[in-house]
Image (spheres, helix red, strand yellow):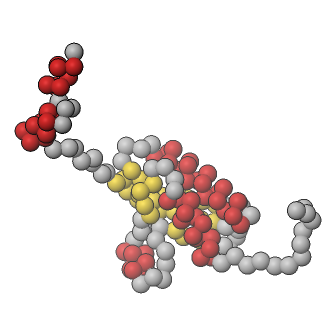
Amino acid sequence: MSERPIPGRSYVSKRAIVEVVRAAVLESYGVTGLADPDLGGRLLRWLHLRTSGIRLNLSKGIGVELFLTVAYGVPIAEVARQVDSAVRYGLRRTMGLEVDQLVIHVGGLRYQPARLPAAGPVAAESAVEAGDGPAEAEVAR
C-alpha cells in the first residue's frame, strides 16, 4: 500500500466517535458501566437524545468526558489509567484521531457479592454418594 496521501475527504460523525469510546471503556478492566451525572442526563438518555456517561466536545480538538461506575475493590487510579489508554488507542487506531482532553469521573462503586454454594446436609450427602466425600478418600488409602 502506498504511503502517499490520497486526495479526498472523509467525515466522522459524533455518534461514531462516541461508539468507539463506549466500546473502549466497557472493555476496560474494572469498569462496570457508564453513569449519568444528573437527572437531566438520565431523562435525555431515556428519551434516546443522549448517550449515557459520555460527553463529547469538538469545539477545540477532541474533548471527551466520561462518567463511570467501577467495581468495588479494584484500584480506581489503575482503572482510570486503563480507560485513558484504551480510549486514546481506540480513537487513534480506528479513526486516526488524537484526543486533546480526556476527563474521567468515577460516579460510583458497584459491589456484587459472589454467591456461595449451599452448604447443608443435602449437599454433604450428595458429595459422599458421588464419591467426592471424605468416605471415598479414606477407602482409597
Left or right? Give the position of 59 relative to 79.
Answer: right
Which quadrant would the N terminus be assigned to in this image? bottom right
Left or right? Give the position of 88 relative to 8.
Answer: left
Query: How many tags in the picture?
Result: 0
In the rendered image, residue 86, in percent from the top left (x then y), is placed at 60, 54
Using the rendered view, name the quadrant where residue 20 is placed: bottom right
In the rendered image, residue 16, in percent from the top left (x then y), is placed at 62, 74
Left or right? Give the position of 6 relative to 65.
Answer: right
In the picture shown, does residue 3 fall above or below 50?
above
Identify the residue at horizontal 17%, vertical 20% (top origin): 139
Using the rendered view, name the quadrant where residue 131 is placed: top left
In the picture shown, does residue 135 fall above or below 45?
above
Residue furthest top as drawn? 141
Left or right? Give the position of 5 relative to 16.
Answer: right
Identify the residue at horizontal 52%, vertical 53% (top origin): 28
In the picture shown, does residue 32 fall above or below 52?
above
Q: Is residue 90 visible?
A: yes
Q: Is residue 120 visible?
A: no
Identify the residue at horizontal 56%, vertical 59% (top origin): 24
Identify the residue at horizontal 69%, vertical 76% (top origin): 12
